[in-house]
C-alpha cells in the first residue's frame, strides 16, 4: 500500500511525502529441516561496490546473518550456516540459504542492498517461522511422565 501526504507551505510551495508500507513475506520451515531459503531476486548487473547484507532484526538485538563477500561481524549463531549463490551482483539473486534451521532462528529477516557511499537502494523483509521442535519436546515429556506414572 502506498500512502501520500501533501503539505502546503505558503501559496506556491507544495511538498508531497510518499510512504510505502511493505509487509514481510511469510516463510515456514520445520525445525530439523536441512535448510530454508529466503528468496530475493532483483536487478542484475549491479556495480561491484554494491553491499548486500542480511540481518535478523527481531528478536532484538539485530544480528548480522550474512554479508556478501565476507564473514566479518557475522553473528556466531549463523557462522557456517548461511550462503548465497555465487556472483549475486551479476545475477541479481540475493536468496539466502540458512542451513539446519532451529526454533531460535525464527524472526524477522531483511536483506538490505546499498550502493556506493552506503546509499540505501532496496530491501526485502521476511517473517521466518520455525515450527515443530518445541511441540516434539513437549510430547516426549508427556510420554515420559505418563510412563513413569504408569509404573
Image (cartoon, grey):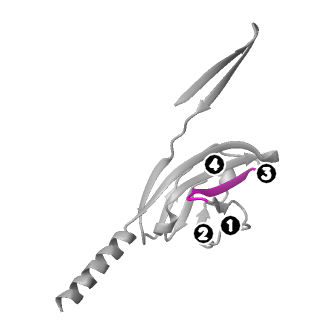
Q: Residue shown at 76%/8% (left/top)?
A: 12
- Highlighted magenta segment, given as a residue range: 49-60
Q: CA distance from mark 3 to mark 2?
A: 24 Å
Q: Which residue is mark 4?
A: 92
Mark 3 nearby-residue class (10 Å; few <14, some 14–19, many ≥20):
few
Q: Which residue is mark 1?
A: 74
Secondary structure at badge 3 equals: loop
- Answer whether labels 4 and 3 touch (C-beta < 8 Å): no
Secondary structure at badge 2 equals: loop
Q: CA distance from mark 2 to mark 1?
A: 7 Å
Q: Is residue 147 or residue 97 the one in the foreground?
A: 147
Q: Main secondary structure of the magenta part?
A: strand
Q: Which residue is mark 3?
A: 49
Which x, y percent locates residue 126? 52, 51
- Answer whether labels 1 and 4 touch (C-beta < 8 Å): no
Q: Residue shown at 35%/76% (left/top)?
A: 137
Front disc: 3 or 1: 1
Amino acid at each position: 500500500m502506498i500512502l501520500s501526504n501533501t503539505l502546503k507551505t505558503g501559496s506556491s510551495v507544495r511538498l508531497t511525502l510518499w510512504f510505502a508500507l511493505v509487509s514481510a513475506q511469510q516463510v515456514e520451515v520445520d525445525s530439523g529441516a536441512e535448510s530454508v531459503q529466503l528468496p530475493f531476486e532483483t536487478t542484475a548487473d549491479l556495480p561491484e561496490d554494491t553491499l548486500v547484507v542480511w540481518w535478523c532484526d527481531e528478536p532484538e538485538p539485530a544480528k548480522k546473518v550474512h554479508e556478501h563477500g565476507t564473514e566479518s561481524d557475522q553473528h556466531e549463531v549463523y557462522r557456517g550456516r548461511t550462503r548465497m549463490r555465487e556472483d549475486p551482483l551479476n545475477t541479481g539473486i540475493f536468496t539466502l540459504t540458512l542451513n539446519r534451521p532451529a526454533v531460535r532462528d525464527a524472526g524477522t529477516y531483511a536483506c538490505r542492498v546499498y550502493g556506493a557511499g552506503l546509499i540505501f537502494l532496496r530491501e526485502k523483509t521476511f517473517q521466518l517461522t520455525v515450527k515443530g521442535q518445541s511441540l516434539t519436546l513437549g510430547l516426549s515429556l508427556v510420554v515420559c511422565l505418563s510412563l513413569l506414572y504408569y509404573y
